[in-house]
Structure formats: structure tokens, C-alpha cells
């Protein structure tokens, strides 16, 4: 008998994210002396910009060390409201904004505030690994809309309309998307908005955490369409664009009644986020987005390097992502192939083969609802990427019918 049987059914139903599982497996192999290149986690490999670090030091000097308001300090919420107007043409007041310990908590707050047991939550696939688990935790019913590399991993308005039922309460999606990098244009969001607006009690969480990591296109926000402004919760944060992953700060902007509900939920779980980080985040949010262009430029160079090798591998289907820092190739051509007695039946099998034989850690598409694909993070040095892509190419060439 194990003690785990005494855990709640809610906790036992939660799955560990495969991203974390693959990272743990790669650490174990590294500890055994294996030369592992890990491309499994979605984390920029840059340091936090110095001007943000200096703002954090100043916050410590100024003794900003006491409990903050649950929804965030007023100066930061006001700065976020100005940023949303400046960059996204979204009109919000500070009272419509809740600051949390990461965008993940912002999403959880909103889901727990809106979803009742049995409510359906539409999630286009591929999706970020945690969406499904948060919905399940709220006793909601995930309803997956499949996409493919052929349509750049994006849903259409016609698809969305087919999946809406009387039980539909919420939709969760990201643009740019983790894991595919897919980014919805203004026209595409406008088409979705027309469908969403037809159902009054239908809400959408628009996850825009990768907003600043785009390669040429202009970012578009769903909430900018007036017909769905009151149905949209916009989520963003500092982890990706400003490389502040360990600082744990995100935010949401929504109709005030939803913001108040999220404040209520957060007040019973974590209360306010770190005061030091919040004061430092003011410097980040007030900065011109061009201040982190050097990171975006580096991601473009790394993406091109990875693609230059991957595009020479027979059987891979690859598209060029317009945002985020992932490649999400369709690897299904390798299903059914062997290496010795090892049979590759799925993307999970292929990811484990590449980890154990090529010493490259990736994440199988099953984690994201796209079982034909694998996710490759190019948030790594050019040297690591070049070596990893060559290892992948060699390992795939060893598979046979």
C-alpha cells in the first residue's frame, strides 16, 4: 500500500507536464555523465536586462518589503494599463488588472473564477501543457479542436463555430503559440471574434505571454475587437519577453467583475506577488519594446540555424514559426521505423530515442495535443543548437523500415 491512495482525487487526476518530466530525465542522464543537450524547456537563455535589475536593487534599498495589495501595487497596475493602450490599443483601468505570480496563476485564477463543473472549455491543439490540467482541476471539460502543420496550427472561425455547444463557457488559446509559434493575424482574430460574440456567456482567455517574441509581424489582441472586449481576458507577463522566468510575475486584464473574482481567488491562495519584483516590473513595462530587440534578433538567427539543418532531413514536415522560440515539426514519417529492436510507434517513442541515443532532450507532441509532432526549443546557444540538430539528423538517418 502506498500513501498516495490517501491523496485527493483532484490531485491524483493531475498529470506532470511532460516538459518538466523530460527536463528531469535529461538531468538524470547528465548526472550519469552523458553529454545531454536539453531543448525541452521554454526558457530564454538570456539574463534579465540590467535596467530591470537596477530597479529591483532600488526597490530593496527603498524597503519595499511589506505585503502588497492582492491584485498588485497601484503604480504597476497603472503602468500595465498604459502599456496595453500603447502597444495593444486596449483600454483598461488599474481596477481591471490583476498581477499574479506568473501568467500561469493568472490563467488559473480566471478558469477557477468562471468554470463550473461540467462546463466545456474549448482549447485549440497544439496547446500549452498546463491548460488541460487547470481546466480539469476546475472540474471543467476540455474540448479540443485539432489543427495540423498544413494550416500552420491555427483554427478557423468555421471550426470554432462547430465546437460551440450550449455547455461551452470558455476558450483558452495563445498567440504566439507555445508550442507551435503560430500567431493569429488581425483578420483571423476578427473572424473568430464574430463567432465568439454570438454567444453571450462565452469567454476567452487570450494568452499573449510571447507577444514580444515575434519575427516581423505585428501583434494583434483579441480584446481589441469591441464586440468581444467584455468577453476577453488578456493574459501576459514578464517571463518570456524580459527573460524574467525566475522572478515569477504575470498579469491579466479583464472586465472589472472578472478581475474582482480573480482578486478574490488569489487572495485565498497566494495573496500578492513579490513587492520587489513588482517595482522592478514597472521599469520593464515602461520600457520601449525595442529594449529587448537584441533577444528577438538572436532568436531569429538561432531559428534560421536550426531550420537550415532540419530542412535537409528527409520525412520531416516543418513550417516557419512567426513567433515564440520553438519549432514544431511533424515527425510522423518516422513512426513504424526501427533502430535495432527498438520500434518507434509515436512521437513519445521518438523523443525518448533521441534522448537516449542522440542525447538531445525534446518534448513529444502528445504533451500538447498534437501526437504527430515534437517540440524543439531554440532558446539555446548557436553552438548547442548546431550540435543538437546534427545529432538529430544522424539519429534519424539510423532508423529503418
Image (cartoon, helix red, strand yellow):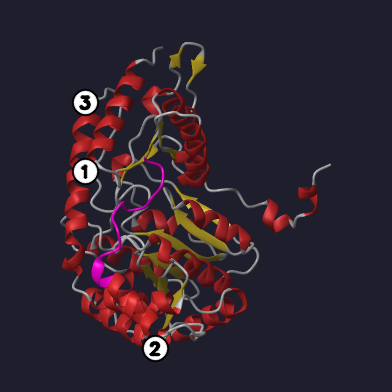
Q: Distance between the residues labelled 3 and 1?
A: 16 Å
- Judge by depth and name the residue closer to the eye, 101 or 49: 49
Mark 2 vs mark 3: give the one in front.
Answer: 2
* Secondary structure of the residue carrying numbered label 3: loop
Q: Where is residue 165 in the image (x, y as percent from the top left)?
A: 53, 62
| Residue 274, above or below 331 | below
Q: Name the residue under label 3.
A: 312
Q: Which of marks 2 and 3 is nearer the N terminus?
A: 2
- Judge by depth and name the residue closer to the eye, 95 or 36: 36
Which image quadrant is residue 119 in?
Answer: bottom right
Q: Mark 2 points at which residue?
A: 74
Q: Mark 1 points at which residue?
A: 302
Residue extent of the magenta highlight:
39-52
Q: How far apart are marks 2 and 1 (CA)?
A: 39 Å
Q: Residues within 10 Å of mark 2 (few under 14, many from 20)?
A: some
Q: Position of residue 24 (x, y in %)?
A: 51, 41
Q: Where is residue 102 in the image (x, y as percent from the top left)?
A: 45, 67
Amino acid at each position: 500500500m502506498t500513501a498516495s491512495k490517501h491523496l485527493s482525487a483532484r490531485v491524483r487526476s493531475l498529470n506532470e507536464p511532460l516538459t518538466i518530466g523530460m527536463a528531469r530525465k535529461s538531468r538524470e542522464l547528465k548526472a550519469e555523465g552523458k553529454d545531454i543537450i536539453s531543448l525541452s524547456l521554454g526558457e530564454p537563455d538570456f539574463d534579465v536586462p540590467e535596467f530591470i535589475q537596477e530597479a529591483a536593487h532600488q526597490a530593496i534599498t527603498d524597503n519595499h518589503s511589506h505585503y502588497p495589495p492582492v491584485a498588485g501595487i497601484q503604480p504597476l497596475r497603472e503602468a500595465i494599463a498604459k502599456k496595453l493602450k500603447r502597444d495593444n490599443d486596449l483600454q483598461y483601468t488599474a481596477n481591471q488588472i490583476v498581477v499574479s505570480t506568473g501568467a500561469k496563476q493568472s490563467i488559473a485564477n480566471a478558469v477557477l473564477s468562471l468554470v463550473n463543473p461540467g462546463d466545456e472549455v474549448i482549447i485549440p491543439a497544439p496547446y500549452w501543457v498546463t491548460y488541460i490540467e487547470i481546466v480539469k482541476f476546475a472540474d471543467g471539460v476540455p474540448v479540443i479542436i485539432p489543427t495540423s502543420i498544413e494550416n500552420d496550427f491555427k483554427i478557423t472561425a468555421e471550426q470554432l463555430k462547430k465546437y460551440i455547444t450550449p455547455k461551452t463557457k470558455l476558450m483558452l488559446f495563445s498567440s504566439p503559440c507555445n508550442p507551435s509559434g503560430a500567431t493569429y493575424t488581425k483578420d483571423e482574430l476578427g473572424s473568430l471574434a464574430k463567432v465568439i460574440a454570438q454567444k453571450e456567456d462565452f469567454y476567452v482567455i487570450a494568452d499573449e505571454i510571447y507577444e514580444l517574441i515575434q519575427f516581423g509581424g505585428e501583434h494583434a489582441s483579441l480584446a481589441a475587437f469591441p464586440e468581444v472586449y467584455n468577453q476577453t481576458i488578456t493574459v501576459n507577463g514578464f517571463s518570456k519577453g524580459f527573460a524574467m522566468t525566475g522572478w515569477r510575475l504575470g498579469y491579466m486584464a479583464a472586465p472589472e467583475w472578472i478581475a474582482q473574482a480573480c482578486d478574490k481567488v488569489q487572495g485565498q491562495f497566494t495573496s500578492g506577488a513579490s513587492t520587489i519584483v513588482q517595482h522592478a516590473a514597472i521599469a520593464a513595462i515602461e520600457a520601449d519594446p525595442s529594449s529587448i530587440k537584441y533577444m528577438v534578433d538572436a532568436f531569429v538567427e538561432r531559428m534560421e540555424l536550426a531550420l537550415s539543418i532540419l530542412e535537409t532531413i528527409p520525412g520531416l514536415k516543418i513550417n516557419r514559426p512567426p513567433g515564440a522560440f520553438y519549432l514544431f515539426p511533424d515527425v510522423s514519417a518516422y513512426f513504424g521505423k526501427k533502430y535495432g529492436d527498438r520500434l518507434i510507434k509515436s512521437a513519445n517513442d521518438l523523443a525518448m530515442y533521441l534522448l537516449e541515443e542522440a542525447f538531445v532532450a525534446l518534448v513529444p507532441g502528445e504533451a500538447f495535443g498534437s501526437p504527430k509532432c515534437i517540440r524543439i526549443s531554440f532558446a539555446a546557444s548557436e553552438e548547442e543548437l548546431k550540435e543538437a540538430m546534427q545529432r538529430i539528423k544522424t539519429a534519424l538517418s539510423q532508423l529503418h523500415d
